[in-house]
Each structure stands twice: as C-alpha cells, then as structure tokens.
Amino acid sequence: MLEDHLISAAHLSRDDIEAVLDRAESVDSAGRAGHGSHDGHVLALCFFEPSTRTKMSFESAMKRLGGETIDMGSVESSSVKKGESLADTVRVIEGYADAMVLRHPSEGSAKLASEFVDVPLVNAGDGAGQHPSQTLLDLYTIRENAGLDGITVGIMGDLKYGRTVHSLAHALTNFDVRQHFISPESLRLPRNVRYDLHEAGAQVREHTGLEEVLPELDVLYVTRIQRERFPEEREYRAVAGEYRIDNGTLSDAHPDLTVMHPLPRVDEIAPEVDETARARYFEQAHNGVPVRMALLDILLGGDR
Ligand code: NCD
C-alpha cells in the first residue's frame, strides 16, 4: 500500500500504480514546473551508493513541488565513516525531514531502515534487491508508448543482480503482460523472483538469445551488467559485452518496438539506436521527475 514506505514493487497493487501514473500524467499535462503544494516539506537524500538520475530527479521533483531537500552527502563525508549503524543514521535523519530516500549496497537495507522510522521512506535501490520508484517511471514510459495491457515485454541483460529488473518483473504481474527474460545462464532471474512471478500467475519465459523472441516484443528493456555486484572480476569479464544491441540486431523487431534502459548504459545499446524512433531511454529518465513528483505528493499526504 502506498501510504507509508515504498520498499518493494511486490507491495504495489494495480490501483497504487495507476494512482501514481495518473497523477504523474496530470503533472505532465499541467507542465512539470511550479506545483508549490509542499512548501515547507523537506526530503532527505541518503545515498550510500553512486547515483545521478535517481538522486537528481528526486531532488528536482521535491523542488518542483515547492519543498526542499537535504543531502547526507557521500559516505566518506558522513558519520557512517565513523562506524554508525544504518538504523542510527536513519533515526537521526528522520528528525530533519518529512520523507527520506535511501540507496544502500545491502539487499534488505531499506526494509530494515523502514522499521526504525515513521516518515515515509523510499527504497532507491538496496543492493541487488529492489528499486521500486524506478519501476514506476518505467511503467509510466511503457504505458505512454505501448499501453500496459495485452503487451509482450522482453527484459534483457543482468537479471540476477539488476534491481530494476526485479522490481519491474513484480510490478508487471499486475497487468496483462507476457514477460520474456533474456540473459546468459549465469545471470538468470534469482530463484525467489521466479517463484514470486510463478505465484502471481505471470506469463513468463526465459531465453539465452534475443533472436528467438525479438519479433514478438512490444518493449525491449535492456540493462547494464552490474559489474559492482560480481564477487569476482573474472566472472564479470566472462559475460561483459554479450547482449548488446544495435540497429542490425533490431532489424527483425516489430516496427513499433519501444527500447528502454534504466541507464547508465555502458555498451549495451549502440549509440546509433539513439537516433531511431524506438529509443525511449532518455525520455524514460526524464519521466523520473513527474513520476517522483506524483509519488512524493502521495507519500506526503497531498491527496488526503
Ligand atoms: C539503476 C540502478 O541504480 O539500479 N540506475 C538507475 O537508478 N536508473 C540501474 C543501473 O545502475 O544499472
């Protein structure tokens, strides 16, 4: 339920998702600037891992709502460096803000932190776990470009460590969506995610090659191999550079295929694809602003 924290996309119902997307759409149609309904509200940004899009779009969203942001800064410059626990850190920051956004390298950290705070906490990535606010902007982009029912989505790349993948796969089970997962054998979806999809009755298939499924896809969601999560660099090198797409790879695709990527990309999508009408990843990143405005507005009680 979208009333307190947002920890996992598995907790989002279709109604929750549609409430955010509809509100984001009205933000968009009214123009993204100047919705000053949260004057005096403060959002705390707590990023224990690098971030560009997530952090800056939350910041932009809060400012466009008329609120303010405070930033914990880098781990190097915070008291975490002195050995403070995550629980203590968030308990203190809670007193400075009306909501907080947390990114942390450990899976489960957002859930743990949420048990220590009363202000709404958004999980902006917990290791290889979940990244549900990314999913909301992904769904917004899919809905705008392909609709959210009666479609076929391919999710390709690092399905094991990719938290955006885990969140998106969970959320898509709320819609009539066939999901195809394309990855090397070693980077298949984790067993717990496969189990949840099965329990949700999702229409899921797994593949090691894109060719066999590409012509069926309405959306292709490409992901970066999550180098920082591999225990051994050697294991990363064994799969790096596979699963790249360029205009040649996409020649058998449906003419209306939508290509998405949560970004940052390394080499998964050749720059030549950027120039085609299929490329939606920059628009997707920009959608982070209206979607996070809508999310913050709901979490901060804008609709109550
Ligand atoms: C993603 C993340 O941090 O999980 N980035 C993002 O928030 N858009 C994807 C990635 O780092 O590959």
Image (cartoon, rainbow, N blue to C red):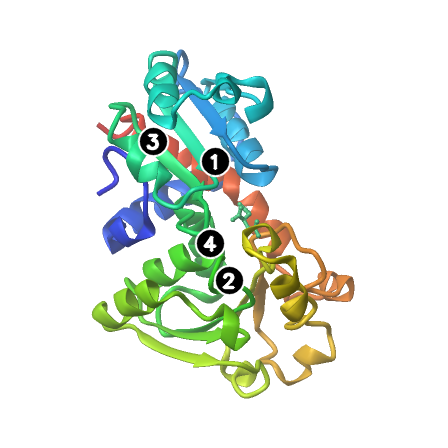
Residue type highlighted by circle 4: Thr
Secondary structure found at label 3: strand
**Is residue 20 or residue 172 the one in the foreground?**
172
Mark 4 CB within 8 Å of ligand 1: yes
Q: Give the residue furthest to the bottom.
A: 212
Q: Earlier in the sequence, mark 3 or mark 4?
A: 3
Which x, y percent locates residue 96? 38, 12
Residue occupying the point 47% across, 35% down:
30
Tag 1 residue: 30
Disc 1 vs disc 2: which is toward the camera? 2
From where the camera sits, is residue 216 visible? yes
Tag 2 residue: 145
Residue type highlighted by circle 2: Asn
Mark 3 CB within 8 Å of ligand 1: no
Residue occupying the point 65% across, 70% down:
238
Disc 2 vs disc 4: which is toward the camera? 4
